[in-house]
Image (cartoon, rainbow, N blue to C red):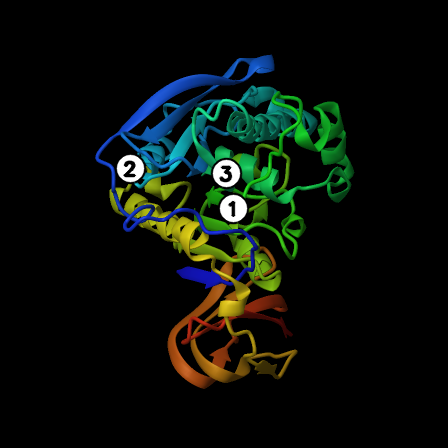
Amino acid sequence: MLTLAAFSFGKASAQCPSGRYNSFVFSSYTMDSVVYSTPYNLKMDIYQPAGDALTARPLIILAHGGSFVGGTRADDATVTDLCKNFAKRGYVTASIDYRLGSLVPMVLDSTVAIDVVIKAISDGKAAVRFFRQDAATTNTYKIDVNHIYYGGNSAGAVLYMHAGYLNDTMEAPTYLRTALNANGGIEGNSGNPGYSSGANAVINLAGALNNVSFVATGDMPSVNAQGDNDATVPYSCAYPLSGSVHVNLCGLGPLEPQYVSKGIYHMSKVYPGDGHVPWSTDATKFAQVDSMVTEFLYNLTCTNVGVSEVATTSEVSVFPNPATSEVNLRSSEMVKEVTVFDQTGRVVLSYTGVNNKNYTLNTSLLSSGIYMMKVHFADDNFTPIVKRIVIE
């Protein structure tokens, strides 16, 4: 299931010569390893298009998986393959190391687990500042600082999702605020001070947030993928690593309706029945993810997708509400798909090929409770609408 929504952002388009950023316009790339965090001697591998003459290139920074206890910048094939592919499309890309913890202490004490993740977030922000500092000084990497994107795979996506959506210590619950304050505050203590750690979008491959409320109106766009049977990073809201680490994480299930309700421009792909990072072992699924991220970033880099280009005047009503065995939907626009999520974000009903303005959903098999109904329109110029329904 692929979903899209609209978002308005006010930045200029990058230089986009024909074919660049959506196809392999370079046959090869160069790669250099550099230290980006002097306090912790952390390295990144920087990939650049070989022979590129452009002097202002968009940047993608990616972080590897490994449950915050393992992995390196070089051994997550999803991350390194994306870095190589996007370098050949004309981006500058980087795969970063970050500080890791030990599994047993993280399992035994949730405060240890939180501290490990906060340290990693601090490192991820320092990586952004490294490139902004370079752009303001030696300009070795010729970065367009108006087009910086970051994200990752698994733990790396958890890292950058929080870097992107947890924007203020006061937004965080007490247990996160304590860890943030102990590690240099919201910007962290991993080096390169005096430069912004901000970015323009996040690439979320099987990542999650501690709380979906961190996603607010006006926040950055995102591109997302996850299997709906993922228990390593929960697709719904639960403890990660099959419940062994007692820190709440909410995956794409509840994030998707939050993006919609807050008007966040996004693309999302759910892999029904799949567990954790299915694209890491399936070449076809990796190609799908690579293609979706390519389209998403091209839209941001070259076309200035904006809310002014998207109609939002569609009207949808649902009745009866509360309901028992069925819910009627009436729309001012042609509906193509209806999806119903439970409170954990799991898809419990999905109707495709609706092709009607009026539709009746059979809800007789649903348990009593509160659900979210997401309505997709046949005309993609209309953003999906989310309605709250109650089943008695």
Quickly name the residue at label 2: 88
Alpha carbons under labels 3 and 2: distance apart: 22 Å
Quickly name the residue at label 1: 201
Circle 1: residue type:
Ala
Quickly name the residue at label 3: 157
Circle 3: residue type:
Ala
Q: Nearer the viewer, mark 3 or mark 2?
A: 2
Circle 2: residue type:
Lys
Q: Nearer the viewer, mark 2 or mark 1?
A: 2
Alpha carbons under labels 2 and 1: distance apart: 20 Å
Decide which of 171, 371 is in the foreground and name it: 171
State which quarter of the image contains the C terminus.
bottom right
Which residue sits at x=60%, y=67%?
371
Decide which of 367, 371 is in the foreground and name it: 371
Which residue sits at x=50%, y=33%?
155
Position above or below: 176 against 299? above
Residue 155 makes an appearance in the image = yes
* Element marked by disc 3: helix
Decide which of 355, 21 is in the foreground and name it: 21
* Element marked by disc 1: strand
